[in-house]
Structures are given as structure tokens and as C-alpha cells.
Amino acid sequence: MRTLTYFVATSLDGFIADPKGGFGDFLFEGDHMTALYEEYPDTLPAQAREAMGIDAPNKNFDTILMGRATYQVPGGLPSPYPHLRQYVVSTRLTTTPSDVEVIAEDPLTKVRELKEEPGLGIWLCGGGRLAATLLPEIDELVLKIHPIVLGKGIPLFAGDIPTTHFTKATTRTFDTGVIFTTYTKSDS
């Protein structure tokens, strides 16, 4: 069975973006970015992969789930991850390129179906409301914790969610102060 991984950058106070959905305060240079390029090249959008000459096969994921706001980030591409199967969860989005499928109803059922298929992992890219909806199916959290406090913005999980336990699997600290921490869902 495939796993659903919420792989996301977050501030120290648990925000994945500022109130307008921007993430310009996060760090985009340094040793943590080198690790990201080498270990998670499949999480880079097409324009970054092209600019960096990355044509590597997917290592971790072959499918991406995005909320509408994550998909429609300003300056974004109509097909930002053509090297992955792309899904956008939205009840308002009506047109996308043929390689981007819209999930208008019941994303939990769709995720359960995707998890039964063969393949690599499923990447939950954002946002906070979608993460709250899909929490029952999230198997792993990979948090890229940046050394900033935003004070307000889009939370890691937005909405009324049940208490859910995770166990720390790994932690890596970089010279930039960014910490990559992986948690797996606990049985308890």
C-alpha cells in the first residue's frame, strides 16, 4: 500500500504561508536546499527542475495532491508538476490542463483509492484545510521547519481536527537553521 506524506515547509509557530498565501519569508538558499534537490527532486516544480537541469527519475513520489490555493499560487504554472500525477482538490476550479485532475468531491475516498494502486508515495503539498480533511489518511509528516515566526497565516492544519499521534522518525538540522523532521503516524 502506498503512503500519503504531508511534505511541507512550516514556520516555528506552525504556519505554512502568510495570510495571503505567500511564502517569501521562508529560506530558499543554503545547505537545506541542497539536501532538498538531492533527496526530493520530485518535489520541485517543472520550472525549477528545468532551470537546475534536473531530469532525475522520481525517488519518493509519483502523485501530488494540492488544494486550489496551492495550485493557483501567483506566478504558478498550469501544470506545475508534469513529472507527477497531479490532483487538485477544489469545488470551484473548473478548467485545468489534461494532466491535472480536479477532485470536486470526497478527497478522502480518492486518497484511499490512490493508496491501493501500485506506485511510489503520494505527496500532499498543501494547504492547511486539505491537510485537516485528509488527516485520517496521512501516514507521514515531513516538516521542513524554518527558523522564522510568522505570527499569523495559513496553519499547518486548518480546521477542526481530532487529536492524532505521530512518532518522530528522523531529524536533520542544517547550517541555515532549517530542520527536516519526519514523523510517522502512531498506532495509538
Image (cartoon, helix red, strand yellow):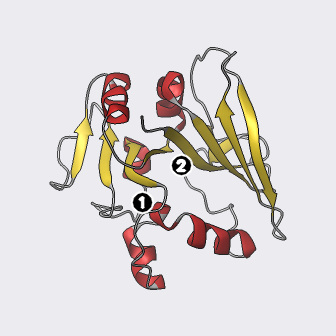
Which of the pair 160/184 is nearer the observer? 184
Q: Residue at x 81, y 69 (%)?
A: 176
Binning the other alpha carbons within 10 Å of mark 1 as few (below 14), some (14 to 19) or many (20 upward) gives: few
Horizontal and vertical percent for residue 71? 38, 50
Horizontal and vertical percent for residue 49? 43, 76
Question: Dot 2: what SS?
Answer: loop
Question: Dot 1: what SS?
Answer: loop
In-image side of 22 versus 130 (left or right): right
Q: Quadrant of the N terminus?
A: top left
* Disc 1 to disc 2, C-alpha distance: 9 Å
* Cβ atoms at labels 1 and 2 below 8 Å apart: yes
**Residue labelled with disc 2:** 21
Residue 73 visible? The answer is yes
Q: Quadrant of residue 165?
A: top right
Residue type for callout 1: Pro
Residue 151 visible? The answer is no
Q: Quadrant of the C terminus?
A: top right
Q: Residue at x 54, y 63 (%)?
A: 40
Horizontal and vertical percent for residue 69? 42, 45
**Residue labelled with disc 1:** 74
